[in-house]
Amino acid sequence: MADPATITLALKAAIAAATDKRTWKAVGVVIAAILTPFILIIVMIMSLLSATAEHNNSAVDLTFHGGNITSQMPADYRNYIEDMRGSFSDLDSAVSEITPMVVSGSIDSARMKAIFYSLFFGAENLRMNAADYRAFADCFVRYEERTRTVTDADGNETEETYTVAISISDLNEIYGNLESSLGRTITEENKVNAAQIYSRVLYGHGLPRDGSIGEDEWSGGVFDGEIYTGGGDFASPLGANWRSMVTSEFGWRPNPFGGGGGEGHSGLDMGAPKGTPIQAARTGVVSYVKNSGSSSYGYHLAIDHGDGMVTLYAHCSKVYVRSGQTVQQGDVIAAVGSTGRSTGNHLHLEVRIGGKKVNPRQFLP
């Protein structure tokens, strides 16, 4: 064991080194030398991920909306886009064969293509035959045999059997049909991707946007004053007493943050204590979740109800669901909060039809 004098000298040397700026500078240089390669690797990975995400978004836009594929697009993406465009054309042909038989609802071809894209984009030798595309499209309808009485020119009546198609709005049933038809498991990742692609196709870069719009946009058609008769099966996200909770109506309003002026308010605000459960107003599929306070909407989510109708729930303190998840009317999906651009705890409820914001009040019971 070292004697006390040796230990004392060692301690003094350590203290001197620790207080010497040259020592710390040398240590910093060593640490930087060790960490720099790792930092560069992380930066490169983040750059690659960012570039890949941009290519993915561009591929979706080019596939669904057309346009020239630039030379900056990687060659493999170019091939995938061209294959997918050809497949979409064949899907359109399959849908055109089914449409005359549809007696209830309508086939959502955008939804069909979003799911097809999520399942097959990037697949080698993608092109199928006409029967395969028809089988895929058949998964989105339910066929029924019906009979009717036919009278000929002589007045004789005969019974005739015919087939009708009923469009399916329940995504769980659609995915079940697809799994049986394709002989493969459709993962949650596939479903989430399909929901996000569908939202992008219908609404551009996604549903979320600041709910406070300037006068020019208010008068430019983004907002819609038309009265809709659909949606009678809505339920209030905050219960039967929602009318007593309304703090701000849909429409033009004074600036709630002061300073004069006004703004177009794209939803209906209902004040409630933080943590109050928010329920889905209608059955549908969660198309978007934002768990970040950086957006003007704060923590928020959107639910796609089919037929172009979407509801959005903003300024939440918590969101309990995920993108791609099917929710039933009345399911608790989030909690009231005051995240984002907000003056207090409340729910900002929006209803959008075909991308236009309409007054939620006309749908609530």
Image (cartoon, rainbow, N blue to C red):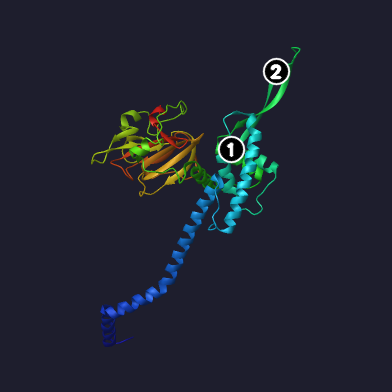
Check disc 2 and give the amino acid type.
Thr
- In screen coordinates, is 256 left or right of 169? left
Mark 2 residue element:
strand
- Residues packed near mark 1 inside 10 Å, few (<14), some (14 to 19) or many (20 plus): some
Mark 1 residue element:
helix
- Give the spatial CA distance, label 1 vs label 2: 32 Å
User: Mark 1 touching mark 2, by CB under 8 A?
Assistant: no
Q: Where is residue 241, by image quadrant?
A: top left
- Quadrant occupied by the C terminus: top left
Name the residue at 56% across, 58% down: 74
- Quadrant occupied by the N terminus: bottom left
Question: Which residue has dot 2 on it?
Answer: 149
Count of residue discs: 2
Comparing labels 1 and 2, the label whose residue is closer to the camera: 2
Image position, residue 195 (x, y; %): 51, 44
Does the rendering let one see residue 129? yes
Check disc 1 and give the amino acid type.
Glu
Image position, residue 342 (x, y; %): 30, 42
Q: Where is residue 259, by image quadrant?
A: top left
Question: Which residue has dot 1 on it?
Answer: 173
- In screen coordinates, is 48 left or right of 346? right
